[in-house]
Image (tube, grey):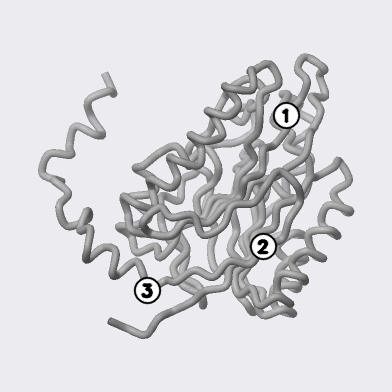
Amino acid sequence: MSEKRILRVGLIQQANTADHSDNKRRLKESIRSAAAQGAELVVLQELHNGLYFCQTEDVNVFDQAEPIPGPSTEEFGALAAELGIVLVLSLFERRAAGLYHNTSVVLEHDGSIAGKYRKMHIPDDPAYYEKFYFTPGDLGFEPIETSVGMLGVLVCWDQWYPEAARLMALAGAEMLIYPTAIGYESSDVVEEQTRQSDAWQLVQRGHAVANGLPVITVNRVGHEEDPSGQTKGIRFWGRSFVAGPQGELLCELGQEEAIQIVEVNLTRSESVRRWWPFLRDRRIDYFEDLTKRYRK
C-alpha cells in the first residue's frame, strides 16, 4: 500500500448576521487561524456570506446573488493564495438573469478556481423555501481535483441521498464534503429535534461506511429570525463533524462557534475497502429500476 497520507482539515462553524462584510471579516480571521494551526483544507458552511435567506420568499433577495468567478471568489481566492490552502466556499450564484444556483466553489492553494458543484437536491419545506431561489444543479456528481485530493463536494440537502454519495465515490472522490445550513424547527418538541439532528448525522456516517470514505460536514450555528414573523425562526444546530471510512467519529463540534483542525488519514479508505468490499459486490445488473420504477 502507498505511504500514509494525512490531511489536516479545518472546520469553521460560524453564526451569521445580516452584515455580509462583518460575516466575511470574521470568516477570514477564522480561516487565518485554521491555517496557522496547520490546516491544508478549510471548509466553510452553506451560504456563509450572509443569513440563511430561504425562510421566506422575497424577490429582492436575488440581488444578493453573484457571478462565479466574482467578488467572493476573488476575495477568498486571494486569501487562499496568501495562506497556501485549499478552500471550500458556498455561494448564491447568479448564472444569468433569472437563473440562480446554490453553488460550492473549491479554490486551489494558488487562489484559482479548481471547480464548482451546483446543489442538485433542492428542498421546499416550511422555513426552507429553497425551490423559490435555486435551480437544481446541472454539473452532475463529479469530484473536484485539487492538490490535497479528489473532493466529492455536495451541499446540505444532498446529505440525505445515498445515490449522490455513491456516484461521487464511484467517480473517484477521496472524501465527501457537505457545506450545510440546517437547524431546529421552532414548533417541534425537544424529542423530535433530537431525533432529526441524530438522523442527520447518522445518514452521513452511513455514507462513509457504504462508500469507505471520510465525510466532512460543516454546519452553521446561532438563531436567525424569520423576517415574516410567521415562525420563531431557525436555531441552527451546529454539530459539524468528520467521520472516518467506517463511520467512526473523528470530531464533533457543539452548538457554538468553533474552529477545529482534524487529521484525516486518506490511505485508510484503501484498507477499509479491502476488508469491506461493498463496491465490488454491488449488483448493478439489477439496479436499472432505480431510475425507472417511480417515474410513472
Picture disc at residue 234: 1
Picture disc at residue 281: none
Nearer-N-terminus badge (2/1) = 1
Q: Residues within 10 Å of mark 3 (few under 14, many from 20)?
A: some
Q: Which residue is rendered at x = 67% and y = 61% of the image?
A: 69
Give, as a three-letter code, the residue at label 2: Gln
Give, as a three-letter code, the residue at label 3: Thr
Nearer-N-terminus badge (3/2) = 2
Callout 2–callout 1 Cβ contact below 8 Å: no
Q: Which residue is mark 2?
A: 260
Q: Is residue 262 left or right of residue 238?
A: left
Q: Position of residue 229 (x, y in %)?
A: 82, 17
Q: CA distance from mark 2 to mark 1?
A: 24 Å
Could you tell me how many numbered marks the image carries? 3
Residue 204 in sight here: yes
In the image, residue 54 above or below residue 285 = above
Q: Which residue is mark 3?
A: 267
In the orientation shown, which residue stands out farthest toward the left? 285
Q: CA distance from mark 3 to mark 1?
A: 38 Å
Element type where label 3 sits in the image: loop
Residue 78's quadrant in the figure?
Answer: bottom right
